[in-house]
Image: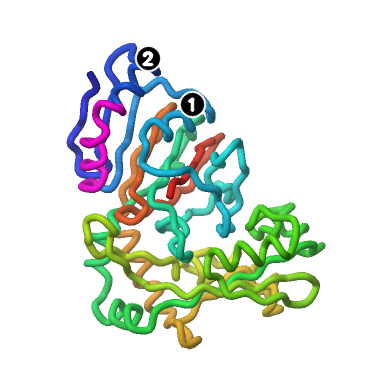
């Protein structure tokens, strides 16, 4: 038997002593309905002490949990490495940089329903995968800020290159701007255009084989099963500002992205008008106020309902290797 520790978020499920992988998968099958109910209630499940040791077994765990079909990270542009199948490293941002809370791919129409993390190498210090309840975040956002975003909705704009000496130089020092071949996992313009149409992305090709992507999305949505309203957007990640990046990175970004067609991210209201910086700073503060952090232990498995729960990453020291995957 496995033990469930009823902490509010995430709900911790601990392995019984000397449990085998086959026994673990049998437990997942036996408790399938109960685990689904708990995930909808708590938003996140942390499986601790179970015999999962590598990327292949992580994939087997996701398949055994049977929450959905594995999907690739197409349309997302955070720097990460593809390991095998639909398993990737978590975002390869510099260790000193905090990644604020967000719902994975909330800026696309076909967002993943669940996201999974596996701790292969815990960091020496810091490096928690921070999480938050998106229901609580929705309730905490200022009413006027919330009203403006709900009524006006959001327009996300991204730009990606095929070949760029400047971007190659930037990425050599800090991986930050992916090419469109990486973002779409495609080698031709025709493939990229097809994937844009499938995902309902507006797009146009600009000079030097750059592509500009535009996506219009709501600021909040209702969970498809529980019908609870949640905060579900990434405007705070698409606005490059000193609070997000820190002063020196912000100044560096201003220099690198002087040309409009090269700007990695921009965000507007749906009508094209600017979102007040003060509103974005307020959202960042609300996210900080609702952050939950737990230290990673080797072989930990974290499963999040990607609508009910947000995630991010704390700064860290030492080696850290967390694998990630998603299902539809």
Instruction: Answer above or below: position of 37 versus 151.
Output: above
Residue on which disc 2 sits: 20
- Where is residue 23 drawn, in percent x and y? 33, 17
Residue 49 vs residue 164: left or right?
left
Residue on which disc 1 sits: 57
Residue 89 vs residue 212: left or right?
left
Instruction: Answer above or below: position of 76 versus 123.
Output: below
Pointer 1 with pointer 2, Cβ within 8 A: no
Q: Residue at 50% across / 86% down in the picture? A: 272
* Sequence-earlier tag: 1 or 2: 2
**Mark 1–mark 2 distance (CA, rounded to whole Å):** 12 Å
Q: Residue at 58% across / 38% down in the picture? A: 85
Magenta span: chief secondary structure? helix
- Where is residue 323 drawn, in percent x and y? 51, 38
Q: Residue at 77% across / 58% down in the picture? A: 168
Residue 29, picture quadrant: top left
Visible in this render: residue 175?
no
Residue 199 is tagged as none
Q: Is residue 48 magenta?
A: no
- Where is residue 186 drawn, in percent x and y? 69, 55
SS for dot 1:
helix
Q: How many marks?
A: 2
Residue 89, picture quadrant: top right
Residue sitting nearer the eye, 315 or 101: 101
Visible in this render: residue 226?
yes
Residue 16, picture quadrant: top left
Instruction: Answer above or below: position of 290 versus 82.
Output: below
- Where is residue 253 drawn, in percent x and y? 64, 69
Q: Give the residues in magenta.
A: 28-42
């Amino acid at each position: 038997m496995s033990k469930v520790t009823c902490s509010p978020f995430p709900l911790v499920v601990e392995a019984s002593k000397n449990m085998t992988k086959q026994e673990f998968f049998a437990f997942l099958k036996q408790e399938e309905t109960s685990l689904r109910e708990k995930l909808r209630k708590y938003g996140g499940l942390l499986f601790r002490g179970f015999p999962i040791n590598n990327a292949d077994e992580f994939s087997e765990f996701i398949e055994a949990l049977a929450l959905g079909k594995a999907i690739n990270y197409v349309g997302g542009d955070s720097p990460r490495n593809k390991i095998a199948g639909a398993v990737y490293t978590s975002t390869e941002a510099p260790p000193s940089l905090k990644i604020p809370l967000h719902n994975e791919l909330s800026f696309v129409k076909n967002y993943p329903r669940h996201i999974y993390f596996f701790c292969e190498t815990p960091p020496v210090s810091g490096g928690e995968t921070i999480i938050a309840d998106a229901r609580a975040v929705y309730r905490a956002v200022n009413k006027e800020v919330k009203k403006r975003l709900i009524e006006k909705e959001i327009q996300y704009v991204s730009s990606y290159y095929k070949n760029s000496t400047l971007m190659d130089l930037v990425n050599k020092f800090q991986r930050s701007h992916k090419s469109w071949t990486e973002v779409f996992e495609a080698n031709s313009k025709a493939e990229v255009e097809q994937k844009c149409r499938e995902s309902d992305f507006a797009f146009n090709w600009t000079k030097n084989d750059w592509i500009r992507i535009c996506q219009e999305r709501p600021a909040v949505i209702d969970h498809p099963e529980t019908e609870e309203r949640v905060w579900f957007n990434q405007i705070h990640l698409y606005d490059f500002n000193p609070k997000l990046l820190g002063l020196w990175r912000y100044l560096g970004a201003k220099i690198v992205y002087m040309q409009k067609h090269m700007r990695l991210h921009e965000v507007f209201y749906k009508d094209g008008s600017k979102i007040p910086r003060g509103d974005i700073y307020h959202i960042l503060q609300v996210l900080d106020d609702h952050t939950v952090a737990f230290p990673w232990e080797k072989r930990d498995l974290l499963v999040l309902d990607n609508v009910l729960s947000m995630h991010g990453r704390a700064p860290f020291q030492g080696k850290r290797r967390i694998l990630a995957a998603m299902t539809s």
